[in-house]
Amino acid sequence: MSTYGRFWVSTEVMVDGSEVQFKLVRTAQPYKDIERFVAEDKVMGFVVGPGVLPIVKAISMDLRGKTMLVTRSIQDRDDEKGVVAHLDHFGGRVIMSFDSIRNETDVVWEALYGVT
């Protein structure tokens, strides 16, 4: 089951004379036995696609009728658990952590962007 959320981030920046308010979009997917999906032919369809698609859709919907997309890097927090990978040249990152109580691996995709 995938969870999807949109959160407003209070960061506002002036870019080319336009005020840009940033949004943080986050998708999360729990996996039991994630090792089943690490094969090259499965990782795109079962891990990357379900995480990236809702983010791309949200950005595409917000970008309609706008002229500029601005992204920013997401800063790591001290209380995060797991491993974090940042997407170069884009305000996105992936966080993977293991929940020993549920015996599941959580994969979280986040993007920080604004449109104007």
Image (spheres, helix red, strand yellow):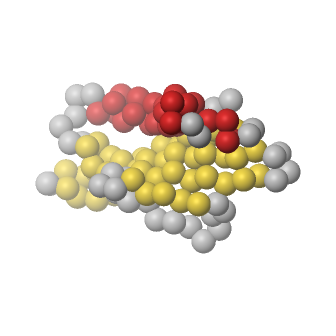
Residue 65 placement, left or right of 92: left
Q: Is there any visible trace of residue 8 in the rendered image?
A: no
The N terminus lies in which quarter of the figure? top right
Residue 85 placement, left or right of 114: right
Q: Give the x, y percent position of residue 69.
A: 25, 43
Tell me if residue 68 comes above or below residue 21 in the rendering: above
What residue is drawn where x is 85% and y is 51%? 101
The C terminus lies in which quarter of the figure? top left
User: How many numbered markers are drawn?
Assistant: 0
Quadrant hosting residue 77: bottom right
What residue is drawn where x is 48% and y is 43%? 25
- Decide which of 31, 10 is in the foreground and name it: 31
What residue is drawn where x is 33% and y is 51%? 90
Q: Residue furthest left?
A: 16
Q: Give the x, y percent position of residue 83.
A: 59, 60
Q: Residue furthest right?
A: 101
